[in-house]
Image (cartoon, rainbow, N blue to C red):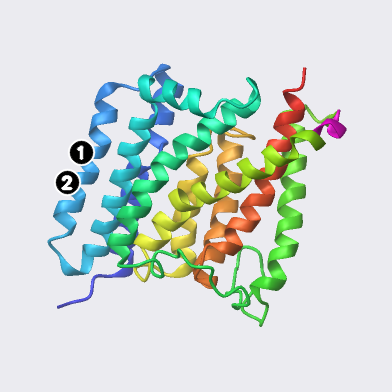
Amino acid sequence: MIPLPTAHKLVLSAGLLLVGSDLATIVAREWTGAVPVWLAVARPVVLGLAALVLWRWAQLRALAGLALVLLVIVLAQSAVVAPGLRRALQGLTAMNGGLFDVIALGIAQKALIAVPVAAVLLLVCRGPRNAYFTVGRLSAPVGRMTLLRLGGDGLRWHVLAPLAVLLIALGTFAGVLVTVFDGGSAPRMQYLIPMLPAILFLAALNAFLEGVIYRNAICGALRGVLPTGTLALLAGMFFGIAHYYGAPSGVAGVMLASMLGWFLCRAMIETRGFLLPWGIHFVQDIVIFSLAAVLALP
């Protein structure tokens, strides 16, 4: 059997990720103001057919697994926004009648997506280790990152991670100030102290659930199929597109989130576990949720 070129696997992987991402939904909403019904039907149909077709070739069965995981993500995303389920979740996640209710509702929806995704991913990857559901080796060497001009020289992740946490947190803080607070300082930070327990709890959950959906799902399904840098780049873009309506939003938000997603996926793949990227993401979410809480103060 002639091995399939990596370029062909790259094209197929990128195509599946584009179908499974929110790109088509975003474009439709921005251009027409609504998402057509046919698009909501077409995405799962394409992914389901792709999974069936790709499964017939031994060299492409990993891509069939990716198509299946993406199918579960798309179907679960459609299910959690159904009005009846949304109202039920709002009742279950009510906290203070304000911002935390909105955040908690979003996290509850992500949980309902992450659970079936994790279950299918464990089957596709044949166990938690291949799906990166392990702590990982935090002292693993950092591979060469041409984009950042570091790694490949003996640098270890447990050394790079604290610096990355600091820089990402500061960058996020500055980015939100510029885009949300119009460049001014965030006032009333002293009022955050009573809200810190809720912020820490919600940030920890959000970072873990987004990790399952946007990192484990992609990196696990494509493990060994693509080179580390290429895989991390594709998974990062998938993560970035999902944050088009985040903070910051728009194309700038997608680019920044894609960069973060790429870095976190590199950390996951090279340490072979979820803990280190979860920790970095957790600290960033603390910053975002704290600024959002300050912004929402009356």
Give the quarter of the image for residue 32.
top left
How many discs mark residues in the rendered view? 2
Q: Amino acid at mark 2?
A: Leu
Q: Position of residue 124 (x, y in %)?
A: 28, 61
Q: Residue furthest front?
A: 92
Q: Residue furthest left?
A: 56
The foreground one among 176 and 268 is 268
Q: Which residues are magenta?
A: 188-192
Q: Position of residue 190 (x, y in %)?
A: 87, 33
Q: Residue at x 39, y 66 (%)?
A: 128
Q: Which label was assigned to residue 45?
A: 1
Q: Residue at x 56, y 32 (%)?
A: 104
Question: How packed is label 2: few (under 14 Cα within 10 Å), some, or many (20 or more)?
Answer: some
Q: Which label was assigned to residue 49?
A: 2
User: Is 191 included in the stretch rendered in magenta?
Assistant: yes
Q: CA–CA distance between discs 2 and 1?
A: 6 Å
The quarter of the picture where the N terminus appears is bottom left
Residue 80 left/right relative to 148:
left
| Vertical placement of residue 78 versus 204, above or below | above
Residue 72 left/right relative to 138:
left
Q: Amino acid at mark 1?
A: Val
Residue 239 left/right relative to 54:
right
Q: Is residue 179 visible?
A: no
User: Is 172 included in the stretch rendered in magenta?
Assistant: no
Q: Position of residue 50 (x, y in %)?
A: 20, 50
Q: Position of residue 208 (x, y in %)?
A: 53, 51
Q: Residue at x 75, y 55 (%)?
A: 167
Residue 149 left/right relative to 116:
right
